[in-house]
Image (tube, helix red, strand yellow):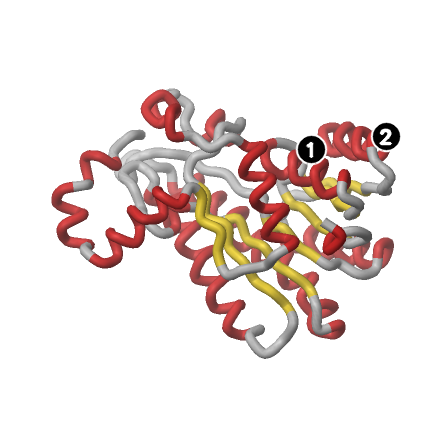
Amino acid sequence: MENLKNKTIIITGASSGIGEKIAMKVANIGARPILVARSKEKLKAISNKINQQTAVDSLYYPLDISDRKQVKIVFAQILKEIGQVDILLNNAGFAIFDSFAEADLEDIEKMFQVNVLGLMACTKEVLPSMLERNSGHIINIASQAGKLATPKSSGYAATKHAVLGFTNSLRMELAKTNISVSSVNPGPIETTFFDIADKSGNYVKNVKKYMLQPENVAEKIVQLMIHPKRELNLPRWMNMGSVLYNLFPNIADRFVGNILNKK
């Protein structure tokens, strides 16, 4: 845990879910979380809670990461006020589950703006200072959906495939530096994520018994910050499905498609 003490960690999507839980966990072990999300009131409440219950000085910055001009302005302010950023956790993202025939292209565009381009924009702002210091860690929250697409999530799966492609390419570009690049590929997590993604409630009902608990996911991601590695796949057994799919795609399409149709 000493590895994170006095480290500065920017967390996007920090106003709820695993972002909020990670912020509290890293603060409890002496790291300084910098909270970023759209909701000023939620961020303020979480930041105040951290500052009251821990010895660190957490700051918060309201930001819609889909607005690239705003990203530049806010990250410039963050870097000016706090200086060094040790870890960037690109956690912000959302989904809307629909069959592609029924999906609204504007919804898909919004998912790409947040899940992919927003993530890349935030990374772009912290990377120069990390390169200058030759140290840092970039963690991108992807999804098992980025490895194994399922019916009624074509838009969302496409964004997470893009996140994994970007993460893997960036890792190779930075291979000769001391900057780590990690992806986190979780299955469904029991958070408010599905309030937007699954308005019918059918998916949550069908996969309830397989859902990951946010507390456990947050703890695993904190451990990833302490011990960086290429990928964190949660749960491991679910990742085996994507491995088998890549090995035997035709068989999987034919025999497993109905099993994956849970939305």
Residue receiving disc 2: 52
| Element assignment for label 1 | loop
- From this viewpoint, which residue is outermost toward the bottom? 176
In this view of the protein, which residue sits in the foreground, 23 or 227? Answer: 227
Left or right placement of residue 61 versus residue 118 in this view? right
Residue 131 appears in which quarter of the rendering? bottom right
Q: Which residue: 64% across, 53% down?
A: 225
Mark with earlier residue (2, 1): 1
Front residue of 197 and 131: 131
Residue at the disc numbered 1: 39
- Which class describes the residues within 10 Å of circle 2: few (<14), some (14-19), or many (20+)? few
23 versus 130 height, above or below: above
Answer left or right for 148 relative to 163.
left
Q: In the rendered view, would you say 150 is above or below 177? A: above
Image x and y of residue 182, in percent: 54, 58
Q: Nearer the viewer, mark 2 or mark 1?
A: 2
Query: Relative to residue 187, is residue 231 depicted above or below?
Result: below
Residue at x-position 44% and y-position 57% = 164
Question: Label 1 sits on what residue type?
Answer: Ser
Q: Are marks 2 and 1 in contact (CB under 8 Å)?
A: no
x 59%, y 52%: residue: 224
Q: CA distance from mark 2 to mark 1?
A: 20 Å
Q: Identify the secondary structure beneath mark 2.
A: helix
Point out residue 103 in the picture as x, y percentages from the top left corner.
34, 37
Q: Is residue 109 visible?
A: no
Which kind of residue does numbered mark 2 sit on? Gln
Picture quadrant of residue 19:
top right
